[in-house]
Protein backbone atom coordinates (compact mmCIF):
# COMPACT_ATOMS: atom_id res chain seq x y z
CA UNK A 1 0.00 0.00 0.00
CA UNK A 2 2.88 2.38 0.71
CA UNK A 3 4.00 1.82 -2.87
CA UNK A 4 0.59 2.90 -4.16
CA UNK A 5 0.89 6.23 -2.30
CA UNK A 6 4.24 6.87 -3.99
CA UNK A 7 2.76 6.11 -7.42
CA UNK A 8 -0.16 8.45 -6.72
CA UNK A 9 2.17 11.27 -5.69
CA UNK A 10 4.34 10.74 -8.79
CA UNK A 11 1.28 10.85 -10.99
CA UNK A 12 0.00 13.90 -9.10
CA UNK A 13 -3.38 12.33 -8.39
CA UNK A 14 -5.42 12.18 -5.18
CA UNK A 15 -6.45 8.63 -5.96
CA UNK A 16 -4.90 6.08 -8.29
CA UNK A 17 -6.68 5.66 -11.66
CA UNK A 18 -4.65 3.21 -13.75
CA UNK A 19 -6.99 3.26 -16.76
CA UNK A 20 -6.81 7.03 -17.11
CA UNK A 21 -3.02 7.01 -16.74
CA UNK A 22 -2.69 4.31 -19.40
CA UNK A 23 -5.05 6.20 -21.74
CA UNK A 24 -3.02 9.38 -21.35
CA UNK A 25 0.21 7.55 -22.04
CA UNK A 26 -1.32 5.88 -25.11
CA UNK A 27 -2.59 9.21 -26.45
CA UNK A 28 0.84 10.78 -25.91
CA UNK A 29 2.49 7.85 -27.68
CA UNK A 30 0.15 8.22 -30.66
CA UNK A 31 0.88 11.95 -30.92
CA UNK A 32 4.63 11.31 -30.80
CA UNK A 33 4.36 8.56 -33.40
CA UNK A 34 2.54 10.79 -35.90
CA UNK A 35 4.64 13.91 -35.40
CA UNK A 36 7.88 14.13 -37.37
CA UNK A 37 10.68 15.92 -35.52
CA UNK A 38 11.71 19.25 -37.00
CA UNK A 39 15.30 18.04 -37.34
CA UNK A 40 14.09 15.19 -39.54
CA UNK A 41 12.13 17.53 -41.82
CA UNK A 42 15.25 19.71 -42.12
CA UNK A 43 17.37 16.66 -42.97
CA UNK A 44 14.86 15.43 -45.57
CA UNK A 45 14.65 18.79 -47.34
CA UNK A 46 18.40 19.40 -47.12
CA UNK A 47 19.27 16.03 -48.64
CA UNK A 48 16.66 16.45 -51.39
CA UNK A 49 18.20 19.79 -52.37
CA UNK A 50 21.72 18.28 -52.26
CA UNK A 51 20.57 15.38 -54.41
CA UNK A 52 18.84 17.58 -56.98
CA UNK A 53 21.73 20.05 -57.21
CA UNK A 54 24.34 17.31 -57.49
CA UNK A 55 22.37 15.48 -60.16
CA UNK A 56 21.87 18.76 -62.04
CA UNK A 57 25.59 19.57 -61.83
CA UNK A 58 26.48 16.05 -62.98
CA UNK A 59 24.17 16.32 -65.98
CA UNK A 60 25.48 19.81 -66.77
CA UNK A 61 29.03 18.46 -66.96
CA UNK A 62 28.05 15.32 -68.88
CA UNK A 63 26.00 17.17 -71.50
CA UNK A 64 29.22 18.81 -72.68
CA UNK A 65 30.68 15.38 -73.43
CA UNK A 66 27.55 13.93 -74.99
CA UNK A 67 27.66 13.36 -78.74
CA UNK A 68 25.08 11.66 -80.98
CA UNK A 69 27.03 8.40 -80.68
CA UNK A 70 27.18 8.56 -76.85
CA UNK A 71 25.42 5.61 -75.29
CA UNK A 72 22.48 6.66 -73.12
CA UNK A 73 23.24 3.67 -70.89
CA UNK A 74 26.64 5.23 -70.20
CA UNK A 75 24.86 8.41 -69.05
CA UNK A 76 22.47 6.36 -66.90
CA UNK A 77 25.50 4.71 -65.30
CA UNK A 78 27.28 8.06 -64.83
CA UNK A 79 24.29 9.63 -63.05
CA UNK A 80 23.63 6.48 -61.00
CA UNK A 81 27.26 6.32 -59.84
CA UNK A 82 27.35 10.04 -58.95
CA UNK A 83 24.05 9.73 -57.08
CA UNK A 84 25.12 6.54 -55.34
CA UNK A 85 28.39 8.13 -54.30
CA UNK A 86 26.64 11.13 -52.78
CA UNK A 87 24.12 8.86 -51.06
CA UNK A 88 26.90 6.74 -49.55
CA UNK A 89 28.82 9.84 -48.46
CA UNK A 90 25.72 11.30 -46.81
CA UNK A 91 24.92 8.07 -45.00
CA UNK A 92 28.52 7.63 -43.85
CA UNK A 93 28.72 11.25 -42.68
CA UNK A 94 25.52 10.86 -40.65
CA UNK A 95 26.75 7.58 -39.17
CA UNK A 96 30.12 9.05 -38.16
CA UNK A 97 28.43 12.19 -36.75
CA UNK A 98 26.05 10.00 -34.73
CA UNK A 99 29.00 8.00 -33.37
CA UNK A 100 30.74 11.20 -32.35
CA UNK A 101 27.68 12.77 -30.74
CA UNK A 102 26.12 9.74 -29.03
CA UNK A 103 29.19 7.49 -28.63
CA UNK A 104 27.38 4.54 -30.21
CA UNK A 105 26.15 3.41 -33.61
CA UNK A 106 22.65 4.52 -34.63
CA UNK A 107 19.92 1.96 -34.07
CA UNK A 108 16.17 1.77 -34.43
CA UNK A 109 14.47 5.06 -35.28
CA UNK A 110 17.77 6.95 -35.54
CA UNK A 111 19.04 4.54 -38.20
CA UNK A 112 15.71 4.64 -40.03
CA UNK A 113 15.71 8.44 -40.04
CA UNK A 114 19.24 8.45 -41.44
CA UNK A 115 18.18 6.13 -44.25
CA UNK A 116 15.09 8.23 -44.97
CA UNK A 117 17.12 11.44 -45.14
CA UNK A 118 19.90 10.07 -47.32
CA UNK A 119 17.30 8.32 -49.48
CA UNK A 120 16.14 11.75 -50.62
CA UNK A 121 19.35 11.99 -52.65
CA UNK A 122 18.41 8.87 -54.58
CA UNK A 123 14.79 9.99 -54.97
CA UNK A 124 15.94 13.30 -56.47
CA UNK A 125 17.63 11.41 -59.31
CA UNK A 126 14.76 9.02 -60.12
CA UNK A 127 12.95 11.16 -62.74
CA UNK A 128 16.15 12.23 -64.55
CA UNK A 129 17.26 8.59 -64.63
CA UNK A 130 13.89 7.52 -66.07
CA UNK A 131 14.28 10.10 -68.85
CA UNK A 132 17.76 8.75 -69.62
CA UNK A 133 16.39 5.20 -69.66
CA UNK A 134 13.73 6.42 -72.13
CA UNK A 135 16.62 7.54 -74.35
CA UNK A 136 18.31 4.18 -73.87
CA UNK A 137 15.24 2.35 -75.19
CA UNK A 138 15.09 4.65 -78.19
CA UNK A 139 12.29 7.08 -77.27
CA UNK A 140 14.59 10.14 -77.24
CA UNK A 141 18.05 11.10 -78.33
CA UNK A 142 20.65 11.08 -75.57
CA UNK A 143 21.24 14.82 -75.86
CA UNK A 144 17.51 15.63 -75.67
CA UNK A 145 17.12 13.35 -72.66
CA UNK A 146 20.00 15.10 -70.90
CA UNK A 147 18.39 18.52 -71.37
CA UNK A 148 14.95 17.29 -70.32
CA UNK A 149 16.48 15.69 -67.22
CA UNK A 150 18.19 18.98 -66.32
CA UNK A 151 14.95 20.95 -66.65
CA UNK A 152 13.12 18.35 -64.57
CA UNK A 153 15.65 18.99 -61.81
CA UNK A 154 15.11 22.75 -62.05
CA UNK A 155 11.37 22.19 -61.63
CA UNK A 156 12.09 19.79 -58.77
CA UNK A 157 14.09 22.50 -57.00
CA UNK A 158 11.11 24.81 -57.37
CA UNK A 159 8.76 22.21 -55.91
CA UNK A 160 11.12 21.63 -52.96
CA UNK A 161 11.27 25.37 -52.30
CA UNK A 162 7.49 25.64 -52.59
CA UNK A 163 6.98 22.84 -50.06
CA UNK A 164 9.49 24.42 -47.69
CA UNK A 165 8.01 27.92 -47.79
CA UNK A 166 4.47 26.60 -47.37
CA UNK A 167 5.56 25.22 -43.99
CA UNK A 168 7.30 28.45 -43.00
CA UNK A 169 5.72 31.55 -41.55
CA UNK A 170 7.04 33.90 -44.20
CA UNK A 171 5.45 36.84 -45.94
CA UNK A 172 4.45 36.30 -49.57
CA UNK A 173 7.44 38.22 -50.90
CA UNK A 174 9.82 36.19 -48.72
CA UNK A 175 8.27 32.99 -50.05
CA UNK A 176 8.58 34.24 -53.61
CA UNK A 177 12.20 35.28 -53.00
CA UNK A 178 13.06 31.84 -51.58
CA UNK A 179 11.43 29.93 -54.45
CA UNK A 180 12.94 32.25 -57.06
CA UNK A 181 16.37 31.96 -55.44
CA UNK A 182 16.45 28.16 -55.46
CA UNK A 183 14.99 27.86 -58.95
CA UNK A 184 17.33 30.65 -60.06
CA UNK A 185 20.37 28.62 -59.03
CA UNK A 186 19.13 25.72 -61.14
CA UNK A 187 18.36 27.98 -64.11
CA UNK A 188 21.81 29.54 -63.74
CA UNK A 189 23.47 26.11 -64.01
CA UNK A 190 21.42 25.27 -67.11
CA UNK A 191 21.90 28.77 -68.55
CA UNK A 192 25.68 28.57 -68.22
CA UNK A 193 25.60 25.24 -70.06
CA UNK A 194 23.43 26.74 -72.83
CA UNK A 195 25.84 29.66 -73.25
CA UNK A 196 28.88 27.37 -73.18
CA UNK A 197 27.34 24.94 -75.68
Image (cartoon, rainbow, N blue to C red):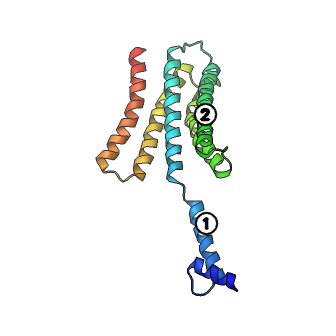
**Residue 120 placement (x, y as % from top left):** 57, 40
**Residue denoted by label 1:** 29
For marks 2 and 1, give the one nearer the viewer.
1
Q: Residue at x 59, y 26 (%)?
A: 82
- Element under label 2? helix
Q: CA distance from mark 2 to mark 1?
A: 32 Å
Q: Is residue 71 left or right of residue 152?
A: right
Q: Residue at x 52, y 44 (%)?
A: 43
**Residue denoted by label 2:** 87
Say the numbered circle drawn on residue 42.
none
Residue 101's quadrant in the figure?
top right
Q: Is residue 149 visible?
A: no
Q: Nearer the viewer, residue 27 or 64?
A: 27
Neighbourhood count class around disc 2 (C-alpha, 10 Å): few under 14, some 14–19, many 20 upward: many
Residue 180's quadrant in the figure?
top left
Q: Residue at x 55, y 12 (%)?
A: 67
Q: Quadrant of the C terminus?
A: top left
Q: Nearer the viewer, residue 7 or 118?
A: 7
> Quick check: 11 above or below 54?
below
Q: Quadrant of the N terminus?
A: bottom right
Amino acid sequence: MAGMGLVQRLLGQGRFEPIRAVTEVSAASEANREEIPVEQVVALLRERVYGAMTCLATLAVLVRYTAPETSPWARVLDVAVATGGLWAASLLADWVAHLGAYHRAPRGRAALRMLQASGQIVEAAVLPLLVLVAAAVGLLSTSTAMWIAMWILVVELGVIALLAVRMAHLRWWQQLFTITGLVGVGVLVVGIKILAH
